[in-house]
Image: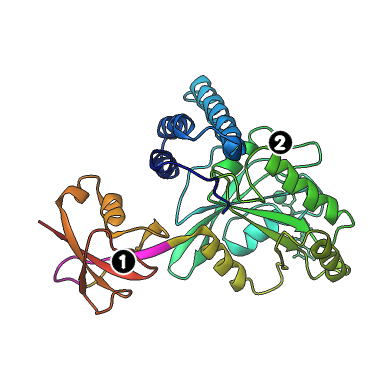
Amino acid sequence: MLMPANLTPQYLAAEARYKKAGTTEEKLEALQEMLATIPKHKGTEKLQADIKRRLSQLREEAQQKKRQKGGYNPFHVEKQGAGQVVLTGFPNTGKSALVATLTRARVKVADFPFTTSMPATGMMPYEDILIQLVDTPPLTADGLPPGLAGTLRNADLLLLCIDLGAADCLEQLETTVSLLVERGIIDTEGENPVAVPYLVLGTKADLPHAADNLAILRELRPDLEILPLSVNDDLAFLREKIFHALDVIRVYGKAPGKKADMERPFILKKGSTVLDLAYQIHRDFPQKLKSALVWGSARFEGQAVPRDYLLQDKDIVELVIS
Ligand SMILES: Nc1nc2c(ncn2[C@@H]2O[C@H](COP(=O)(O)OP(=O)(O)OP(=O)(O)O)[C@@H](O)[C@H]2O)c(=O)[nH]1
Ligand SMILES: [Mg+2]
C-alpha cells in the first residue's frame, strides 16, 4: 500500500482504532481523530478527502438509522461466521447461482435480469469454518440500487462478478469498478485505507466466447486480476481464495490440563497477538493475562510466549492468567 509520508503515531493509532471499531460511534470518533492528526500537506490531500467522505457517509448512515429506529432495513446484513463476503455486479451475471452453489441458501437463479431484489445470505463451509456470503440485487450503468452502498461498504470482502459470456463484459468490468471507486467503496490504487478488499470473478467461463472475452479483458485491464470460473466447476480454489483474501487466522483455545477445542476456532485479523486473542475472549481478560503457551507456530510445542507474540493460522493457545 502506498503510504503518504510523515503520518504521525497519533494518526496511525487513530487509524488502527478505526479498523477495530465495532460501532458507528467508535468509527466516527476515530475518523475525526484521524482527520485532526493527519499532517496537512499535498501528499495527504487524497487521504484527507477520503476521510472526509467517509465521515459524511457515516454521519448520514447514523442519521438514517436514527430515523428508522425500530424499523427493519433489509440492506443491513448482520455479520456471521469468519467474515462477510458480498457479491455484486451487473444483472444476470451469476451472483445468485454462485451463492447457491457455495452455500445451502435457496436463492432464486433465473435467466433474466433483476431476479434478486433484496440481499440474501448463506454460509459457505471452508475447512473447519463458515464464511458468510451475501447475494445482492444488481448494480447497473445507472448506479447502485438504494441501500446497496451501505451493504457493500460494510463487507469484509467484495466479489465483483463479470459475465464472461456476455457481449458487454468489458463495460460491466469498467462500470462496476468505477462505480465502486467513485463511492470510495473500493480502491484500485492502494491509497484509501478504508477501502474494502475485493476479488474480480469472471463468471460463466464455460460459455462460448468466454475464453476470448477473458483474454480481451486481461489485455485492456492488466491492473485487475480476473479469476475465471463456472458454477459447473469444482470451486475449492475459490473458497480458498476467499479465505485468504479475508486476511484472518484461526486460533484454537485450550484450557489448562484439557484438550484444545478444535471445534470452534477464534477468528482474528492476520497480525493479531496473544493480547488480541485475550481481548476477544473477554474485555477484562487482558488485565489478568501474564503469558501464553502456544502449539503450532512456536519453536517448541507448548512454548511460553509473551503477550505481544504474533499468532499464526491454526495455532493452539493456552492463556496463562495471574
Ligand atoms: N453457463 C453458465 N450459466 C450460468 C453460470 N452461472 C450462472 N449461470 C446462469 O446465468 C443466469 C443468471 O444467473 P443468476 O445467478 O440468477 O444471476 P444474478 O447475477 O443473480 O442476476 P440478478 O439477480 O438479476 O442480478 C441463470 O440462467 C444461470 O443459470 C455459469 O457458471 N455457467
Ligand atoms: Mg440474483
Judge whether 17 appears above or below 198 on screen.
above
Q: Quadrant of residue 289?
A: bottom left
Residue at x 46% of width, y 50% of height: 80
Task: Give the residue at x 76% y 37%.
Answer: 143
Depth check: give the residue in front, 32 or 229: 32
Give the residues in magenta.
249-258
Q: Is residue 151 magenta?
A: no
- Left or right of 306, for residue 87: right
Classify residue 171 as left or right of residue 312.
right
Foreground residue among 48 and 80: 48
Other-residue count near label 1 (Cα within 10 Å), few / some / many at <14 / 14–19 / ≥20: many
Residue furthest to the left in view is 322
Label located before the other in sequence (2 or 1): 2
| Whether residue 102 is visible | yes
| Residue picked out by circle 2 | 145
Q: Is residue 81 above or below residue 233?
A: above
Q: Residue furthest top?
A: 67
Mark 2: which amino acid? Answer: Pro
Q: Is mark 2 within 8 Å of ligand 1?
A: no
Can residue 261 be seen by looking at this rendering?
no
**Secondary structure under the numbered disc 1 in the rendered image:** strand
Tell me if the residue at label 1 has its CB under 8 Å from ligand 1.
no
Instruction: Identify which amino acid the numbered label 1 is placed on.
Output: Tyr
The quadrant holding residue 119 is top right
Instruction: Give the image location of residue 195, x and y in percent.
Output: 58, 45
Drawn side of residue 65 relative to residue 281, left or right = right
Q: What is the C-alpha distance between the residues marked 2 and 1? A: 41 Å
Dot 2: what SS? loop
Tell me, for residue 252, which label it has, or none: 1
> Is 29 on the left-hand or right-hand side of 60?
left
In percent of width and height, residue 100 lies at 64, 59
